[in-house]
Image: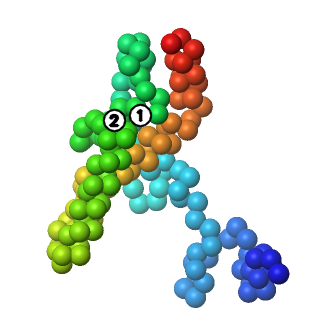
Amino acid sequence: MKLTDILKDSGIELGKVYTDKDKPPFQVNEYGYKTSELVGTKKKPFGSIYNMKEEMKEGKFDPKNPNVNVHGLGTWHLKDLEKTIARQLQECASKAKIGNPEWVAAQLYMKHSPVESKIKAANDVYKQMETPQYKRAVTMYKRKK
C-alpha cells in the first residue's frame, strides 16, 4: 500500500492546502521563497551580499563565504553570521532551561529582534546565492582569476 493510496482513502487530495481544524496542513511552500516574500514579513529583504563587485576587482571575493550586509545591524562573513546565530540560539536555549523565559521571549519575539533579522538575512543571502546571476558572476570571477 502506497502513501498516496492511504491519503486517497482518508479523503486528502494531493496539492491542496487544508485549513479545516481536524485536518493538518498538507502543503506549505513558504520555505522556497525569499524572506521578503513570506506571509507576515516586511516586503523588503533583510540582508544581501555586500561589496561583491569591489571584492571581485581586488581578487578577495570568496564565493562560498561572501560578506553579508544585515540591513540595520552590520556586515559579517556568511560563516561568521551562521556561528553568531547558532551561539545566540544556544544562549536562548540555556536561558530557557535556567528558567528565564522573559529574556528568551524578548530576544526571539520582540518586534525588531536582531536574532530574527540575522536568520532572515542569512536566508535571503542563500536565496541570492542560488540565482543564475550570482552563479554567472562567480563563474566569470573564477575564469579571470
Percent across and percent down for residue 109 are 27, 65
Determine the residue positioned at 27% across, 55% down: 87
Report which residue position mark 1 lands on.
Answer: 65
**Disc 1 marks which amino acid?**
Asn
Q: Amino acid at mark 2?
A: His
Query: In front: 93, or 40?
Result: 93
The answer to whether residue 21 is left or right of residue 115 is: right
Residue 123 visible? The answer is yes
Q: Is 65 above or below relative to 82?
A: above
Compared to 42, does 57 lie above or below?
A: above
Residue at the (58%, 75%) spot, across then down? 25
Which residue is under mark 2? 77
Q: Earlier in the sequence, mark 2 or mark 1?
A: 1
Q: Would you place residue 91 above or below residue 19 in this image?
A: above
Residue at x-position 23% and y-position 75%: 97
Classify 10 Å Cα crowding around label 1: few (below 14), some (14-19), many (20 and above).
some
Q: Is residue 102 above or below residue 37?
A: below
The answer to whether the residue labelled 2 contacts the one labelled 1, judged by CB atoms less than 8 Å apart, is: yes
Residue 1 placement (x, y as % from top left) = 82, 81
CA–CA distance in space, label 2 to label 1: 6 Å
Q: SS of the residue at dot 1?
A: loop
